[in-house]
Amino acid sequence: MDYPEKLIEIAKVDAIEYGEDTSKATDEIEKKASKLKEFPKWGKQLIWLAIRELVYDIRHKDNVARRKAAGDYTKPAKVKPGEDVRSVYRSLYRYFISGTMLGLIRGEDLEGIAKSERAVGEGHIFNARLANRLSEIVPKNKTVEQAVTEKRLAIIFQQVEEDQEFSKAVVEEDQGFSKAVGD
């Protein structure tokens, strides 16, 4: 189930227009959308989508707790759970990937999930590299827009994209070599 197309059209404009002011963007989108004749019909669909986001958020927090219990984070857990709780969190089959418990994923689905997760990860890696690069040139008391011209920002974007493409090529070459030697 996806968001109604007319709602998406409204949201695209206001989400960009209000930048970091998420509350203002949300208020404006709701104000405009509520004037549409379709708005009352969207109620059940929008509630379902909000609940789905809540489910994703809960699963994310559960995954974090599992990783902490398995020792994947450097900081120790704040709460020392009893053995019963620890045994549940140690069941890594209950770890969620792409909205599904790991233990329930079929082999035929793994390659598609891997591609999807890799694409999301690459987006996050790009954003991290871009932020790192900009942190070198943007003074702490200024915004990116105040410190970097749009022309220079376009050049930086291109450089980060090229660096990312090079890194992906090296990883793919490494993976090919590993398969060839039987790793």
Image (tube, helix red, strand yellow):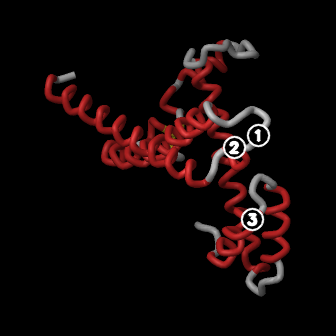
The correct choice, above or below, for 97 with respect to 17 in the image is: above
Residue drawn at the location 56% of the way across and 35% of the way down: 133
How far across and how far down the image is residue 2, in percent?
A: 59, 67
Q: Is residue 89 visible?
A: yes
How far across and how far down the image is residue 41, in percent?
A: 74, 79
- Nearer to us of marks 2 and 3 is 2
From the viewer's perspective, is 50 left or right of 71? right
Mark toward the start of the polypeptide (2 vs 3): 3
- Find numbered disc 3 in the image and state the secondary structure of the residue it sits on: helix
- Find numbered disc 2 in the image and state the secondary structure of the residue it sits on: helix
Identity, as a three-letter code, of the amino acid under mark 1: Lys
Q: Which residue is tagged 1? A: 142
Mark toward the start of the polypeptide (1 vs 3): 3
**Relative depth, front residue between 125 and 36:** 125
Q: Which residue is tagged 3? A: 17
C-alpha span from label 1 to label 3: 20 Å
Q: Which residue is tagged 2? A: 147
- Find numbered disc 1 in the image and state the secondary structure of the residue it sits on: loop
C-alpha span from label 1 to label 2: 6 Å
